[in-house]
Amino acid sequence: MASRNTKEEWKHALEVLRGSTSSLPVMEDEVFHDMEVEVFVRLKFSYDSLLSDKVKFCFLHCSLFPEDFEIEKDDLVHYWIYENFCARNEAYFIIGSLVGACLLEEKGEHVKMHDVIRDMALWIARKYEHEKHKFFVEASVQLTQVREVGKWEGSKRMSLMANSFERIHEVPICPNLLTLFLGDNRLLREFSDGFFQFMDTLNVLDLSRTGIRELPVGISKLNSLQYLNLSRTWILQLSVELKMLVNLKYLNLEYNLNLQKIPMGVISSLSSLQVLKMYSVGIFEVQQGEDNILREDNMLIEELKYLEHLNKLTSLITSVSVSQHLVVNKYEESRSYRYG
């Protein structure tokens, strides 16, 4: 690396990193010394030594999450799968490779990226890999309103996680966007009606742990969407328009304790669905009515019969007969159900 980059060049790189405001965290009080430059060079060497461009991308992808954010391995695997980047077993192998290279820290079923390593990853994504991956990251930077929406246009992967804005009024134009992380914006309740209008290529959308009480208008027009995480929100009812997401393969509704109604025919219409997570849904109150599948377990089973590709289910099943039905189906249809 010394033949390719001088110490002065790396110092300049760190100055650029420190001064960036559009896609890197602000580090006003950071003072970089020669030793820190050396550490940064070593980290870049570790990145350059990764096995393939695919592994390098997966490493950079982890920088979309906030500093020291504990990422569930299973979530990370599904993000990569539904961006059509790698298969499940390969994804776990890549996670192991990054842990082995000391670029990710492993904590049980989670991994996280050290803040210095994340800074380096964001710098690489911006300086070396921008044209290929086009990251836009403003995660956990205390935003009270979104900014620089014009810069979103060329982005392929965006993260605005863990900020403090309550609404998004803008209508961004993002024709190339593949992944959008808006999770952990606990105050976020409102989107402009046209927010999703120009996101035709979006594959992965994470709205988990937000304050939304209903599905944003226009979400049903995301024809390319394969992954949708709505867990731990304040949603009261799923819209019938959700059935239009015919390419959806992953739907997470877990811990929506206030969810009162899922209209009949919505789940069964998601014919491509492979993963359905419904643990701890509708705990507080369930609307009465014949068209609400949350009203009784057997109605959920009837919906599941139409999901030929389903291989993972998490759901709180209260009926013994229904539980037995799931066990039988596990073997007769080669489905793997998990229920708690």
Image (cartoon, grey):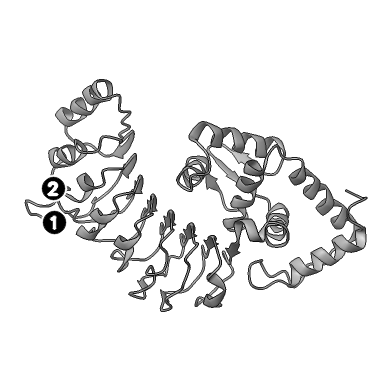
Image-quadrant location for residue 310: top left
Residue 190's disc number: none
Q: Report the residue marked by disc 2.
A: 295
Amino acid type at circle 1 is Gln
Q: Is residue 267 above or below residue 258?
A: above
Residue 150: x and y in percent read 54, 77
Q: Quadrant of the C terminus?
A: top left
Residue 208: x and y in percent read 41, 57
Residue 227: x and y in percent read 40, 50
User: Are dots 1 and 2 in contact, CB under 8 Å?
Assistant: yes
Q: CA distance from mark 1 to mark 2?
A: 7 Å
Q: Report the residue marked by disc 1.
A: 287
Q: Which residue occupies the foreground of this view, 204 or 99?
A: 204
Image-quadrant location for residue 20: bottom right
Residue lying furthest left: 290
Element at label 1: loop
Element at label 2: loop
Q: Residue at x 48, y 68 (%)?
A: 174
